[in-house]
Image (tube, grey):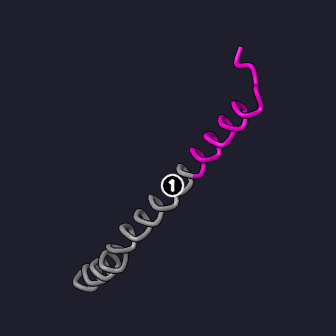
């Protein structure tokens, strides 16, 4: 029983900081992706306004 508890503790300790690392990097990638989408949308809007597109 003691061995099972030690293995469990090693497993939990090994993956404790991994979740924070993955979550932090996921949020960074998501933020940059969002900024890129906003920039593309703003570029498309300004391009359409500059070329005289009728927004009817």
Q: Is residue 39 above or below residue 29?
A: above
| Label total for image | 1
Q: Residue at x 76, y 26 (%)?
A: 52
Q: Can residue 17 be found in the magenta stretch?
A: no
Q: Is residue 2 above or below residue 16?
A: below
Q: Residue at x 40, y 71 (%)?
A: 21
Residue extending farthest top: 56
Q: As rendered, which of 43 and 28 lies closer to the eye? A: 43
Q: Percent position (x, y) of residue 16?
A: 32, 73
Q: Is residue 14 above or below residue 33?
A: below
The secondary structure that dominates the magenta segment is helix
Q: As rendered, which of 38 and 46 lies closer to the eye? A: 46
Crowd band around label 1 with a 10 angstrom C-alpha radius: few (<14), some (14–19), many (20+): few
Q: Mark 1 falls on what kind of element?
A: helix
Q: Can residue 50 be found in the magenta stretch?
A: yes
Q: Percent position (x, y) of residue 44?
A: 69, 38
Q: Residue at x 29, y 80 (%)?
A: 4
Location of mark 1 (residue):
30
The residue range painted magenta reads 36-56
In the displayed structure image, the side of residue 40 where residue 15 appears, left or right = left
In the displayed structure image, the side of residue 24 where residue 12 appears, left or right = left
Q: Is residue 21 above or below residue 1?
A: above
> Picture quarter containing residue 40?
top right
Q: As rendered, which of 2 and 23 lies closer to the eye? A: 23
In the displayed structure image, the side of residue 31 where residue 10 appears, left or right = left
Q: Which of the image's four quarters has the C terminus?
A: top right
Q: Percent position (x, y) of residue 38?
A: 57, 44
Q: Which of the image's four quarters has the N terminus?
A: bottom left
């Amino acid at each position: 029983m003691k061995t099972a508890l030690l293995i469990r503790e090693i497993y939990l300790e090994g993956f404790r900081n991994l979740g924070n690392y993955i979550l932090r990097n996921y949020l960074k990638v998501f933020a940059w992706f969002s900024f890129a989408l906003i920039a593309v949308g703003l570029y498309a809007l300004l391009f359409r306004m500059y070329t005289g597109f009728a927004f009817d």
